[in-house]
Image (cartoon, helix red, strand yellow):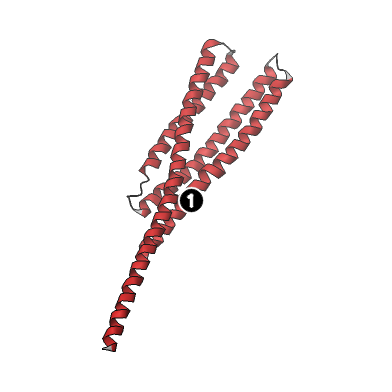
Amino acid sequence: MELDELKNIWAQLETKMNEHGLLKEKILKAIYKNRYNKSLSQLINYTFLSCILALLGIILLIYRISVIYFGPFKMTMFILAITFILCGFIIGITNLKLLYKIDYSKSVSHNMQLTRKYQIRIKRQSLATYISVIILVILAIIASILSSNMELWRWITIGGTIIVGIMAAIWEYKRMYKKNINSILESLDELKELEED
């Protein structure tokens, strides 16, 4: 009789331990899913905002060159800026399409592959953006040197804009893209480990 009671108690304890392990696994999955969704949402929202701002920038520049003629060199700069911003808008739309393919209901390995693809795309996009901005800044400085009415406040504005632009680019890459992409990949790694166990 005592042996049967011990077996029953042991079976009950084993059942409770299994239930506890399953509950712990469900809680961990929910935590990783929430972190994953939060980071993905931030990337989607930021990319969407960037696309809207790019459209507004294009509209503003087109309006500006349609109202005032700046001469051939400055008009070329405005057209080049519109082209760069339009390329950024198109890249933003393709990035949004890729981000919307990352879906929690699909397999973890599929999502990891898409996230790494996005990570590589952002690195390449950042390099192309920095090169484009450097070209535009050099052209703006050349236009300013060639301009006959270049006061001190305009030089200060150009310098301040360059400094703010550099700080914003560093923030954007480190705080927005790198942080959120790494958070998504870490969450997916943890989820993959849970699935394997």
Which residue is found at the position 42% from the left and 50% from the top?
34
Which residue is found at the position 44% from the left and 54% from the top?
187
Q: Quadrant of the C terminus?
A: bottom left
Residue 41 place in picture, x, y as percent: 43, 42
Most distant residue in the right direction? 152
Q: Is residue 77 left or right of residue 26?
A: right
Is 194 above or below relative to 37? below
Q: Quadrant of the N terminus?
A: bottom left
Residue 91 visible from this viewpoint: no
Residue 109 place in picture, x, y as percent: 37, 54
Q: Nearer the viewer, residue 110 or 73?
A: 110
Which residue is found at the position 72% from the left and 18% from the top?
151
Is 30 above or below relative to 129? below
Q: Secondary structure at mark 1?
A: helix
Disc 1 marks which residue?
Answer: 183
Q: Is residue 151 left or right of residue 71?
A: right
Q: How many C-alpha atoms fall within 10 Å of the one at disc 1: few (<14), some, or many (≥20)? A: some
Residue 23 visible from this viewpoint: yes
